[in-house]
């Protein structure tokens, strides 16, 4: 672990204790730090704590309704990747996969026309991911588990200050 990663981890831990002391972390949120992932810190939660908008709920229901058809075609995951910054973002086309797990860019998509699902996936892309330094991530339908997950990564600017006497 580099010094920068240690400093970020310590700052994160201090922030967590601050949130706990202020009562801003609820029991349904959990922290998962896994040595098997490339991510130093990852927060996992069942949902973002807010109810879905009606359009999002309809999109989720439409995606879940397609699981039988996708499973029959041996599709295990369907995903849309989004990326943006500086108030501009793009959502890629729907891609289907037949792997045992999904990670953006890790597997080649299979040939299956799921373009009819594009609108439903786009309805679930997080609002504002493209603002400021931007963000990126994936909306993923796990066909076997009948579960839709959204992974959003927000970019941020950081700086370090060095003060010394000469």
Image (cartoon, helix red, strand yellow):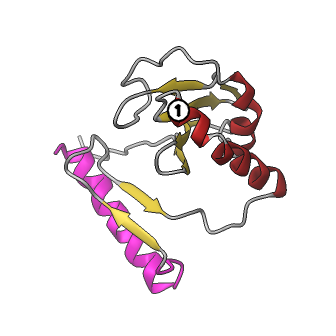
Q: In screen coordinates, is 45 left or right of 116?
A: left
Work out whether residue 31 or residue 63 is closer to the camera in this orientation and state it.
63
Q: Where's residue 20, x and y in %?
A: 44, 81
- Give the farthest residue toward the top: 111
Residue at the image position 34 percent from the left and 53 percent from the top: 41
Q: Secondary structure at mark 1?
A: helix
Work out whether residue 148 or residue 53 is closer to the camera in this orientation and state it.
148
Q: In screen coordinates, is 128 left or right of 38?
A: right
Q: Is residue 25 above or below residue 89?
A: below
- Note whether residue 132 is visible: yes
Q: Give the extent of the magenta segment.
A: 1-27
Q: How many marks?
A: 1
Work out whether residue 114 or residue 15 is closer to the camera in this orientation and state it.
114
Q: Is residue 104 above or below residue 8?
A: above
User: In this figure, which residue is indicated by the disc labeled 1?
Assistant: 72
Q: Where's residue 89, x and y in %?
A: 69, 28
Q: Where's residue 70, x and y in %?
A: 56, 33
Is 56 contained in the magenta span? Answer: no
Residue at the image position 51 percent from the left and 36 percent from the top: 71
- Give the farthest residue toward the front: 72
**Can you tell which quarter of the image residue 113 is in?**
top right
- Note whether residue 128 is visible: no
- Give the farthest residue toward the right: 54
What crowding class fits label 1: few (fewer than 14 Cα within 10 Å), some (14-19), or many (20 or more)? few
- Give the farthest residue toward the left: 1
**Can you tell which quarter of the image residue 166 is in?**
top left
* The N terminus - image quarter: top left
Work out whether residue 40 or residue 124 is closer to the camera in this orientation and state it.
124
Residue at the image position 25 percent from the left and 54 percent from the top: 34
């Amino acid at each position: 672990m580099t010094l920068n990663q240690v400093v970020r981890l310590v700052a994160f831990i201090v922030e967590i204790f601050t949130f706990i002391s202020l009562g801003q972390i609820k029991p349904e949120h959990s922290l998962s730090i896994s040595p098997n992932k490339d991510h130093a810190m990852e927060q996992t939660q069942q949902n973002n704590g807010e109810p879905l908008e009606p359009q999002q709920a309809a999109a989720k229901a439409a995606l879940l309704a397609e699981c039988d058809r996708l499973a029959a075609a041996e599709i295990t995951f369907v995903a849309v990747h989004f990326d943006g910054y500086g108030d501009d973002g793009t959502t890629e086309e729907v891609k289907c996969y037949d792997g045992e797990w999904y990670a953006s860019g890790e597997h080649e998509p299979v040939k299956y026309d799921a373009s009819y699902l594009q609108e439903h996936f786009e309805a679930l892309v997080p609002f504002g991911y493209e603002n400021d330094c931007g963000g990126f991530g994936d909306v993923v339908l796990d066909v076997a588990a009948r579960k839709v997950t959204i992974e959003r990564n927000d970019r941020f600017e950081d700086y370090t200050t060095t003060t010394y006497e000469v």
